[in-house]
């Protein structure tokens, strides 16, 4: 492992940890960052899968008390409802993802796709914020099955790189009457089975590409992703309780516009 590769691992770990749970698309940022760093190919894809587990672990650490209660009090109607809601929300993306997984891997992971979805996603967030849906569900425990299904269907949009899983689920929940807090926390909880299943499936398929020389590099990326996600998730929840998502929308539009300008000038690769 060279010093340059180690720096790439740190940079990409930070990118993953900072963007995974924000409505700005971690996959899109990793595609662009990897392209700029020249860290691409099958080995890079496997690395991105591994560091996603670091981000998941950060959420589990931050919400360890809630996960502990969930496991110890599984007979409680409230905890059973949360498990059922998460299962129902998980299924649409899992089923559709299995059907279109290879097609998206072959055609969707490109800077041009990410550029357009960044812009369009930003416009969608601004439109939802302007509409300001009425809040009917203040807390995660208030969410019922139809709302969970709606959030799960919204999540399927995130199968397209650049859309943002967090953005789709948070804004989907917000549209369906969840408060900012409820929508954001449900998105955090849903990330654990969704990312674990998707990353685990990809890692299983690409496990034969790993070598013992990759372990230090992947470990650095994993730890950096964990630490950066741990910091970001806590601060993000505080932020959304006091502010709208408009800043993230304008960020998406700005980044997407710059990428489109760069690509269409012929200096980038589509």
Image (tube, rainbow, N blue to C red):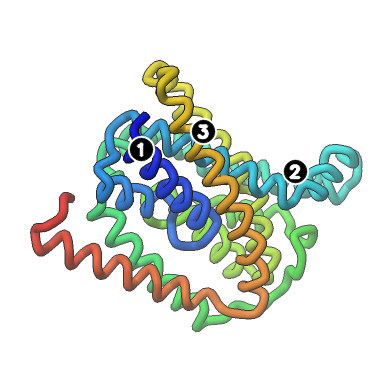
Q: Residue at x 80, y 50 (%)?
A: 66
Q: Is residue 264 left or right of residue 178?
A: left
Distance from Cα at disc 1 to Cα at disc 2: 44 Å
Residue 83 numbered mark, or none: 2
User: Who comes first in sequence, dot 3 or dot 2?
Assistant: 2
Above or below, 98 relative to 205? below
User: Residue at horizontal 60%, vertical 77%?
Assistant: 133
Kindly state the secondary structure of the residue where label 2 is placed. helix
Distance from the alpha carbon under mark 3 to that under mark 2: 31 Å
Instruction: Identify the image quadrant of the N terminus.
Output: top left
Nearer the observer, 254 or 13: 13
The residue pinned by badge 3 equals 219
Labels in figure, total: 3
Residue receiving disc 1: 3
When asked about the image quadrant of residue 39, the answer is top left
Q: Residue at x 70, y 45 (%)?
A: 60
- Asked whether, in this view, residue 149 is left or right of residue 198, the answer is right
- Quarter of the figure with residue 233: bottom right
């Amino acid at each position: 492992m060279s010093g340059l590769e180690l720096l790439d691992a740190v940079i990409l770990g930070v990118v993953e940890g900072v963007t995974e749970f924000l409505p700005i698309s971690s996959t899109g940022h990793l595609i662009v960052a990897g392209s700029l760093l020249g860290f691409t190919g099958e080995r890079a894809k496997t690395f991105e899968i591994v560091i996603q587990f670091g981000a998941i672990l950060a959420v589990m650490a931050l919400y360890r008390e809630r996960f502990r209660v969930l496991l110890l009090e599984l007979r409680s109607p409230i905890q059973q409802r949360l498990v059922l809601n998460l299962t129902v929300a998980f299924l649409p993306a899992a089923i559709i993802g299995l059907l279109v997984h290879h097609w998206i891997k072959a055609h969707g992971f490109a800077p041009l796709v990410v550029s357009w979805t960044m812009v369009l996603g930003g416009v969608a967030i601004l439109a939802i914020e302007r509409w300001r849906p009425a809040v009917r569900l203040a807390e995660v425990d208030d969410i019922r099955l139809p709302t969970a299904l709606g959030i799960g269907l919204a999540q399927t949009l995130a199968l397209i790189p650049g859309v943002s899983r967090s953005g789709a689920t948070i804004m989907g929940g917000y549209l369906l009457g969840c408060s900012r807090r409820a929508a954001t926390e449900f998105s955090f909880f849903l990330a654990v089975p969704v990312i674990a299943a998707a990353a685990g499936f990809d890692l299983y398929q690409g496990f034969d590409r790993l070598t013992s020389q990759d372990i230090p590099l992947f470990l650095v990326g994993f730890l950096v992703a964990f630490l950066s996600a741990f910091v970001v998730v806590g601060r993000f929840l505080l932020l959304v309780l006091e502010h709208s998502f408009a800043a993230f929308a304008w960020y998406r539009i700005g980044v997407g516009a710059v990428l489109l300008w760069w690509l269409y000038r012929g200096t980038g690769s589509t």
